[in-house]
Amino acid sequence: MAIYKRVKTLDPVDAAYLAGLIDGEGSVSLSRKHRNENRQLVISISSTERQLLTYAQDVLGAGKITNKRTYRAHHTPSVTFAITNRQALDLLKQVAPYLKSYKADRAAFILQHYVRLTPRNGKYSSEQKTEREVFTERLLALRPNAR
């Protein structure tokens, strides 16, 4: 069994706070870095307050903060915190009980199916690939007001 780098264990207050940030300013999704790659689990939070995201990164001991591009001079510069793959899955396990939006449905669906449908080596049999595509479509269909 593979050993994955995990996020720190959160106390209930921090888990609930991060869940609130994810519900309010974040996303739980599957996305690609490159067009021909498989989608990977990504949890991200965007904010104009870097210290909020630095807190998330510190309390989790993982993730990356990047600057977002500002398209207009009057827009406030913003940053995004992102955590991916198994670390994102580990985070979801801890914050899922506190999520209140449609992201709670996404978290439950991911926790139920993601590991089974994501081989460690990224190599899918044709059956796994088909199942993974159905999983992706069903997950991305869970959106606001779709409850």
Image (tube, rainbow, N blue to C red):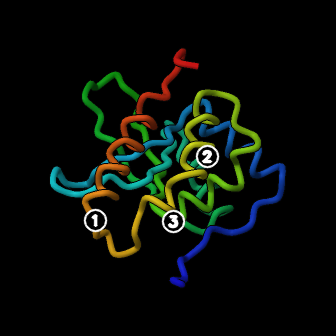
Q: Which residue is mark 1?
A: 125
Q: Residue furthest left?
A: 36
For label 2, the crowd category at 10 Å Cα-Cα, with few meaning under 14, some 14 to 19 and many 20 or more, is some
Q: CA distance from mark 2 to mark 1?
A: 41 Å
Q: If you read the primary sequence from the N terminus, does the residue marked by circle 2 or circle 1 appear first?
A: 2
Report the front residue among 16 and 68.
16
Q: Residue at x 61, y 46 (%)?
A: 52
* Image quarter of residue 103: top right
Q: Which residue is mark 3?
A: 86
Report the front residue among 64 and 122.
122
Label placed on residue 52 = 2
Location of the C terminus (image quadrant): top right
Q: What amino acid is at disc 1?
A: Ser
Q: Residue at x 19, y 54 (%)?
A: 34
Report the front residue among 99 and 78.
99
- Relative to 140, say whether 124 is above or below: below
Q: What amino acid is at disc 3?
A: Arg
- Relative to 4, say whether 111 is above or below: above
Q: What amino acid is at disc 2?
A: Leu
Q: Residue at x 39, y 36 (%)?
A: 77
Q: CA distance from mark 3 to mark 2?
A: 23 Å
Q: If you read the primary sequence from the N terminus, does the residue marked by circle 3 or circle 1 appear first?
A: 3
